[in-house]
Image (tube, helix red, strand yellow):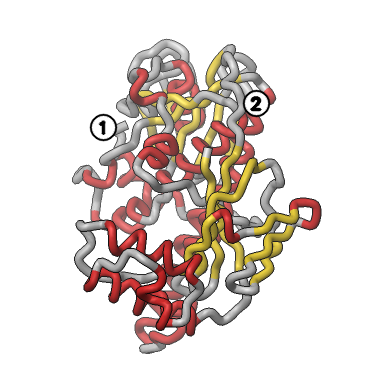
Amino acid sequence: MILTYKTKHNRNFSAELKKAHRIAEFALRTRAQSSKDVACFGLKSLISNQILREYSRNKKLKRVGRVNLIIPNQGITERKEEHKIWIPSLKLQLRYRFPNNFKKINQIEVDEEYAYISVSVEEQKPIIANNYIGVDRNTTGHIAVAANPDTGKVLKLGKEVLHIHNKYKNIRKRLQKKGKFGLLKKIKHRESNRITDINHKVADKIVDYARENNSGIKLEKLDGIRNSKKHIKKFNYSLHSWSFKELQQFIEYKAKLCGIPVAYVEPKYTSQECSRCGNIGTRIEKKFVCQCGHVDHADVNASFNIALRPPIGESMVRLHADRDVCKGSTDIPKEATLRTTGTSNLQTEYAQAERNLLSFR
């Protein structure tokens, strides 16, 4: 399994990156094959060869975008005992914080701020799951609710996400009104970085929970949910800022590292169907009531339904991570530190809009 970690290098490589861009333009124009052809640009041949390989041999490329410095395995020295990596061609030493359980470093890609370290990690043998835990992902309230039908235990995770979204939405509105567009650029990635941090932590807890119970994980197949027109305009921001796909990818690759199977189920009526009797009940905001007498939190009821439903099929059990690797891309788990924030009481504002989505789920 291939994973890519990123870490800050704290160096100025603007001169080298400009040379790399010029080499890429030259390669696209002349289809040069040898580093001798571009030696005049002054970039190390080890890195030049990687650029030539990408831009000279790929006939589909028509223009040069952003060009990074790519260092292959033979140009990298590992110092695992010190958690350090040495790149002689750039005279760069990197200290990393990700686990030392990788087999080898495949390559390192360097841009203006970060070094992206691609490593091969040995996969765990898949476990034989005794049961599955269901994970319900939400736009409001807790971003993930996990339930185990065998024990009845429920985990509610990530309630602070809605508060973060609304906080940064209001900040952007204020800055736009005041015309402070420079500050807008500075906070551009703060919201997404905080949400990514939380998604990592939530995924860790879900995978740990599944491993403790020797269980697999079931998720809803939410592909195409943003194309649904069954929601009010006020709900657009909440829906389009929903990072359910990112959380899904984190759960997938972390589960795969532990040998935990991940399967997908149909999302229709997971929030409306009773997990006890199977009949369609009534959902009012976050409360679910069934005619059989069962009363529960709507997201908890949905997570039990997800756990009990049969998977869609073998094609859906295959991880997205596997498909991405087959296409040549990798997962990018980012080092992060979770900072807990206050919870939000804004759920009722979206209640009516969320009910309009229930026909999808």
What amino acid is labelled 1 in the image? Ser
Q: Quadrant of residue 64?
A: bottom left
Q: Which residue is mark 1?
A: 359
| Closer-to-camera residue (51/2) | 51
For the question of whether residue 301 can be seen, the reply is no
What amino acid is labelled 2 in the image? Arg
| Closer-to-camera residue (159/27) | 27
Q: Which residue is mark 2?
A: 211
Q: Position of residue 359 (x, y in %)?
A: 26, 32
Q: Position of residue 136 (x, y in %)?
A: 46, 33
Which label's residue is closer to the chain start, 2 or 1?
Answer: 2
Q: Residue at x 47, y 77 (%)?
A: 43
Query: Mark 1 packing: few (<14 Cα in 10 Å), some, or many (20+)?
Result: some
Q: Position of residue 302 (x, y in %)?
A: 44, 27
For the question of whether residue 182 can be seen, the reply is yes
Q: Quadrant of residue 12?
A: bottom right
